[in-house]
Image: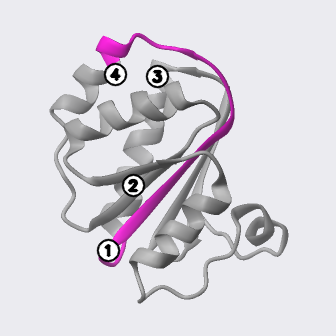
Amino acid sequence: MGHEISWLVDKRVVYVRTYGEMTMSEMKEISVHARKLCEEGIPFVHVISDAAEQGKVDVKLQDVLNFFRGAEVIAKTGWSVYVGKTAMERFIFTIISQFNKNNHRTFATLAEAVAFIQSVDETLPVLPMPGQAKREGRMSE
């Protein structure tokens, strides 16, 4: 069970990476932290959720739907993109995202997700790949 949340681009692009087993408690913690960053950001704040290394998800779909069903939309949020290993994971994210009423897309690779965010917001600087940014010390909480 683990996750990392940081700015890929300060106040503009949030990067969330999950790995290992995911619980409902951790999912709520991630959501609260990501929402806080979005509220602190400069419009439009995009969110990249990278679940490529995520293991078992130990949550009930109904619990997830109930949690996100009443979530308030943050006006500063731009696109929310999800990187998942399987088509089923991406499909489930699409269903959950419809409750948030945000713009959302799913991708099979992180490179596709980063390229998409870059393509839809011309006000952003050139986006680094998250692993590269961390190695070079450019990502911050």
The answer to the question of whether label 2 and label 1 lie on touching residues, with beta carbons closer than 8 A, is: no
Task: Specify the segment rendered in magenta.
Answer: 41-63
The answer to which of marks 1 and 4 sits earlier in the sequence is 1
**Label 4 crowding class (10 Å Cα cut-off): few <14, some 14-19, many 20+?**
some
- Distance Cα–Cα, label 3 vs label 4: 10 Å
* Spatial CA span between label 1 and label 4: 25 Å
Whether 90 is drawn above or below 59: the answer is: below
Identify residue for label 4. Answer: 64
The mark nearer the N terminus, 2 or 4, is 4
Can residue 24 be seen here? The reply is yes
Most common secondary structure along the magenta stretch: strand
Q: Name the residue under label 1.
A: 44
Report how far apart the C-alphas of labels 2 and 4 lie in the structure. Answer: 17 Å
Find the distance from the CA under tag 2 to the CA under tag 1.
Answer: 11 Å
Question: Where residue 104 appears, x then y in whole percent?
Answer: 35, 52
Q: Which residue in the structure is indicated by mark 3?
A: 25
Q: Residue at x 21, y 36 (%)?
A: 99
Considering the image in quadrants, where does the C terminus appear? bottom right
Q: In this view, does 65 lie above or below 99?
A: above
User: Could you tell me the amino acid type at mark 1?
Assistant: Phe
For the residue marked with disc 3, what is the amino acid? Ser
Specify the amino acid type for callout 2: Ser
